[in-house]
Amino acid sequence: MEAHERVRIVDIAEELGLSTATVSNVIHGKTNKVSEETVRRVQELLEKREYIPSMAGILLAQNNSKIIGVILNDSEKYEGHALEDGFVAASLNALAKETECAGFFMMVKVTRQWNEIVRFASMWNMAGLVLIGFCEQDYQKLRDHMRVPFVIYDGFLENGHGLVNLVIDHYDGGRQMGLHLQMLGHRDVLCIADNDTFMDHERFLGLQSVLPEAELLVIPMKKQERKKFYQRQKTYLLTFTAIFAVSDYYAVDMIQFLSAEGIAVPSQISVAGFDDSMISRQLEPALTTIGQNHVERAKMALELLEKLRMHETLNATYTLPVQLIERNSTGQNY
């Protein structure tokens, strides 16, 4: 056999006069029914022939693949760039570090179909899943059709039976932002979101608990439509002294629009966001926002998955705190 050819299991088996199943069992560590002499012969020839096993094959042959899957709903609001979103990128970065520290591998998939998750998890014999951005009906279907344990990031669950939801305190984030803007003298505050449901609604309600006159404006998801929408609503937007976007993405987008219109932030209008994504720190002016601890959430996700694997009974919801981060995009309203 030429040195450059990849050595196969069948080649090792033929040379030793063994079955491919026996050689495969030695490679994958299933040696309880294989004699020590056979194990030694196989291992010596594997080393001599410089056999390189398929990592995927080894993982799939084990009862525990040590793979954690992170599945993201490919919502239309991402416009085909889901993994570039600030919240998503920060979440994946934290999960990647924590899965490695815990001795696991991480695989990422973006999809809109819940049944693809079942196929993906089964194909790779996943040890657990972290799911982001799906609806309660999808989570319930997954619970009924899949044995792989999973935890949910920021699910809005009315029933939640049998599900484990890891959330942040959206309401308190809005409340903290309301207190901050109130302290700066703002009363005419606008909240912008692409919907008035779930976490965005909670963030607005928190803002409104401090500033009862605050208003909510539902904006288009797609960037080009949003720009035209802002042009039409420009007069209305400028009746407010501060704008609170329910995500840093929309806050940065608003600052860019205002800047293009010659409207200075924060001297003419203050703008704030939610998430403390990387871009919020790099922007000029740097964005006032609500920060969440992605590392703590990732650690908790791994801990909860391990408990689910051990069939422990868990709460339906675990809530992590958030914190106001004051930067330069909000200023005093004189």
Image (cartoon, grey):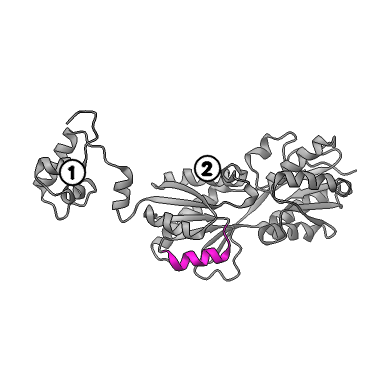
For marks 1 and 2, the one nearer the N-term is: 1
Q: Residue at the top extreme? A: 3
Residue 278 is left or right of residue 252, and the answer is left
* Secondary structure category for the residue under label 2: helix
Residue 285 is left or right of residue 304, and the answer is right
- Check the image and report above or below for 162 versus 220: below
> In this view of the protein, can residue 304 be seen by the observer?
no
Amino acid of disc 1: Val
Residue at mark 2: 93
- Check the image and report above or below for 145 versus 92: below
At horizontal 79% and vertical 48% (from top left) the residue drawn is 229
Label placed on residue 10: 1
Quadrant where the C terminus is found in the figure: top right
* Secondary structure category for the residue under label 1: helix
Q: Position of residue 159 (x, y in %)?
A: 57, 71
At horizontal 53% and vertical 58% (from top left) the residue drawn is 152
- Check the image and report above or below for 4 versus 119: above
Q: Position of residue 126 (x, y in %)?
A: 39, 54
Quarter of the image where one finds residue 204: bottom right
Q: Residue 178 colored magenta?
A: no
Mark 2 neighbour class, 10 Å CA radius: few under 14, some 14 to 19, many 20 or more:
some
Near-viewer residue (45 or 184): 45
Q: Position of residue 135 (x, y in %)?
A: 58, 62
Near-viewer residue (58 or 324): 58
Quarter of the image where one finds residue 256: top right
> In this view of the protein, can residue 238 be seen by the observer?
yes
Label placed on residue 86: none
Q: Position of residue 127 (x, y in %)?
A: 39, 55
Report the Cα–Cα distance between label 1 and label 2.
Answer: 40 Å
Residue stretch in magenta: 134-146
Amino acid of disc 2: Asn
